């Protein structure tokens, strides 16, 4: 049995059909998947006229609900499920995707990402900043500071005394932490 490109949860289908009924035209749904940094995918979904379909598009028909997926997005989307969620923070469509970004296939990168999210970012967030994992190559980790950390005069101290020590202690496979931030571009550092 082959894995479908995109499954459609019942509530998501209902919401899409409501929108299509209101539109009362020949709309289809274009879905795009792009990288959102090295750790996650970003999804775009919009109603477009059926005439915008190109010969390269993969067409998915869920009982008359038509999705168009460009060829670059197909392998990133394969096996995903479109859902409609509603909670205290709001409601909307979300994709449940079993595919991992190439970096998330690396178990060391996953460990480093967890350390950054759980141990490092809560501290730098108090200064309006964040640290993002860019890449892992062998025993080197490449990170980027953003927000209040980008352009901050204390970034070197934060890197050496905080980020680097935390990563090297928590992930023994890593021996070097490289800051790939262009600090000259910082617009709103915490320390001025």
Image: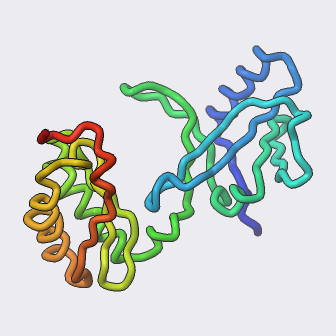
Q: How many labels does the image show?
A: 0
Determine the residue positioned at 86% across, 37% down. 52
Determine the residue positioned at 24% across, 73% down. 177
Which residue reaches farthest front? 184
Give the quarter of the image for residue 189.
top left
Q: Is 94 placed left or right of 46 in the picture?
A: left
Residue 158, relative to residue 26: is it above or below?
below
**On-image quarter of the N terminus:** bottom right
Q: Is 23 placed left or right of 154 in the picture?
A: right
Q: Is 187 placed left or right of 158 in the picture?
A: right
Q: Is 79 placed left or right of 25 in the picture?
A: left
Q: Where is residue 132? Give x, y as percent.
A: 32, 57
Give the quarter of the image for residue 15.
top right
Determine the residue positioned at 51% across, 64% down. 101
Residue 16, relative to residue 125: is it above or below?
above
Q: Where is residue 141? Give x, y as percent.
A: 31, 73
Residue in front for this viewpoint, 106 or 132: 132
Determine the residue positioned at 50% across, 52% down. 36
Residue 49, relative to residue 36: is it above or below?
above
Give the quarter of the image for residue 99.
bottom right
**On-image quarter of the C terminus:** top left
Q: Where is residue 142? Give x, y as percent.
A: 33, 69
Q: Where is residue 3? Give x, y as percent.
A: 71, 63
């Amino acid at each position: 049995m082959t894995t479908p490109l995109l499954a459609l949860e019942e509530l998501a289908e209902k919401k899409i059909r409501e929108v299509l009924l209101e539109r009362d035209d020949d709309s289809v749904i274009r879905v795009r998947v792009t990288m959102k940094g090295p750790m996650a995918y970003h999804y775009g979904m919009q109603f477009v006229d059926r005439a915008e379909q190109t010969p390269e598009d993969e067409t998915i028909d869920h009982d008359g609900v038509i999705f168009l997926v460009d060829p670059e997005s197909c392998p990133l989307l394969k096996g995903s499920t479109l859902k409609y969620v509603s909670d205290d923070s709001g409601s909307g469509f979300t994709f449940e995707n079993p595919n991992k970004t190439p970096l998330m296939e690396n178990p060391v990168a996953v460990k480093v990402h967890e350390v950054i999210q759980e141990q490092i970012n809560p501290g730098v967030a108090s200064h309006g900043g964040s640290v993002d994992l860019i890449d892992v190559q062998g025993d080197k980790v490449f990170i980027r500071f953003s927000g209040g950390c980008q352009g901050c005069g204390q970034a070197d101290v934060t890197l050496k005394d905080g980020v680097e020590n935390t990563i090297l202690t928590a992930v023994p496979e890593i021996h070097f932490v490289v800051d790939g931030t262009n600090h000259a571009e910082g617009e709103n550092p915490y320390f001025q």
